[in-house]
Amino acid sequence: MELILDTMNYFSVLMLVVLGLVVIFGLMNVINMAHGEFMLIGAYTVVAMTGAGASFWLALIVAPITAALAGLAVEYFVVQRIYHRFLDTILATWGVSLIIKQAVILIFGPTAQTVPNPLSGSMEVLGVAYPRMRLLIMAVSVALTLGLYLALFRSNIGLKLRAVIANRNMASALGLNTRRMDMACFSLGAGLAGFAGAMMSPVMSVDPHMGVGFLIPSFLAILVGGVNSLAGPLFGVAAISGSSNLIAGWLSQADTQVIVFVLCMVLIRFFPEGVLNKRKR
Amino acid sequence: MLEIRRLSAGYPGGGRVLHEMDLSIGKGAFVAVLGRNGMGKTTLMKAICGLLPSETGEIRLDGQDLTPLRVYARAQRGIGYVPQGREVFKDFTVEENLRVGRIAKPGLSPIVPEALYALFPILKERAGQKAGSLSGGQQQQLAIARALAGEPRLLLLDEPAEGIQPNIVQEIARKLREIVDETGLTVLMVEQNLAMVDGWADSIAFMDHGRIAESGVPAKGIRADRYRLSTYLSI
């Protein structure tokens, strides 16, 4: 039972990170190498605010806003000029990630920081005592996934966004301000990453490299599942979190990562557009 | 209504296609632009709606200069565009396609008006169906309805008869005529299919090498005008 809960926990954490990527990579086709650093901005916002005496819950609201504003700045000053230059986007956002990481090191230092757990203690779930904060992360992850689904596929703003992504010129000729949609979309993705970082800050050590460990599994989850709907990333996250936790019961963490990545590569080889969906370029 | 003066436009790296062309269309008119391939008809459509920047000249809609405006701003000022090849959102349902046409314009309700479905009843029947699964003729009706959903003042149509069965071409032409007569909408249509023009449009402007060679030619009976068909369409 604990294995199931641990798997669900990893699934939830990964899903929180993937949601931002669904928007920026899945919908906008931008390989944002700074995604992990937007997470970092969220986590360090919590570190700074709780360190100054503010409540974690207030910091949880401010963190995604800070990350979204940082995302807006990155989109405006860097990404908007290179949307259609695939390789340049990777290099530029990688540069942005280095800048953010070094800025964090300059301000907070290279050592890991801790955030006091606002929901300490455990709660019994199906006969197992499980940390309350981790249960909250699971609940928030489910709620946010559902919220993003409703926003993208059941609202007018989501319809506008999908129209811009489907056919930029046509959407513009119908009257949609595509630049404004780009900015909104990119900052939404960054804000979601920031929220993920903030949400996870009490349950993991906050250090300048915390985003890296999530970046590769998150991209793989989207590539494995596909992106036409949220079902693809959900499948990808379930596949990666499930296989990781199952294999980790038998092998070391390094071996587990190698096997999971190889499995992902095999899936991508046979389903290049994603197991569940067709990937659009 | 639409005044185009000394308009020049072309494609980056591809040279100039429109050469200081002039065109004037009155409110409520249904004007067809005819010409051979490569004479600049599609370029004209794209330049009016802003998808191609103009190099010189100006485009005025009801007196307002559209030239400095971006594509979306021109659409919001009242230009509806039906591109060549239709370009419906194939992964969206019919209803979603129409709703995009509504919500793209500030101030319009997202609800698709029943009057629009009354004009194109097949779209009502297929409202929940993916646009990509419709036939070519149905997709063309959807593209026109999507442009109309935004309640434009000027409708631009780029070869709406292309790849459509002859009976559907007649149906689409009749619908357009009805819309012009009932709503006073101004229509500028680029076309090569004379069945879409003869008896349906009010007048024809012939395009030759990036300029309007002749305009104000009555559309009715154009199929019998051997001189113009030979001169401008090589028929």
Image (cartoon, rainbow, N blue to C red):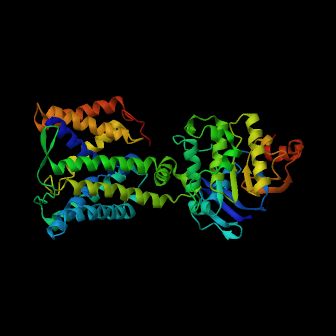
Question: Which residue is found at the position 37% from the left and 42% from the top?
Answer: A230
Q: Specify the quadrant that holds the C terminus of chain A.
A: top left
Q: Quadrant of residue B137?
A: top right
Camera-side residue of A199 and B65: A199
Where is residue B173 drawn, in percent x and y?
76, 44
Q: Specify the quadrant that holds the N terminus of chain A.
A: top left
Camera-side residue of A255 and B168: B168
Question: Which residue is found at the position 36% from the left and 47% from the top?
Answer: A146
Judged left or right of residue B91, residue A236 is left
Q: Is residue A246 above or below residue B20?
A: above
Question: Which residue is found at the position 69% from the left and 55% from the top?
Answer: B155
Where is residue B100 drawn, in percent x and y?
55, 51
| Number of marks present in the image shown | 0
Q: Is residue A228 above or below residue A91?
A: above
Q: Let me know if residue B83 appears in the view.
A: no
Q: Is residue A37 above or below residue B92?
A: below
Camera-side residue of A154 and A239: A154
Q: Let me know if residue A129 appears in the view.
A: yes
Q: Quadrant of residue A277?
A: top left
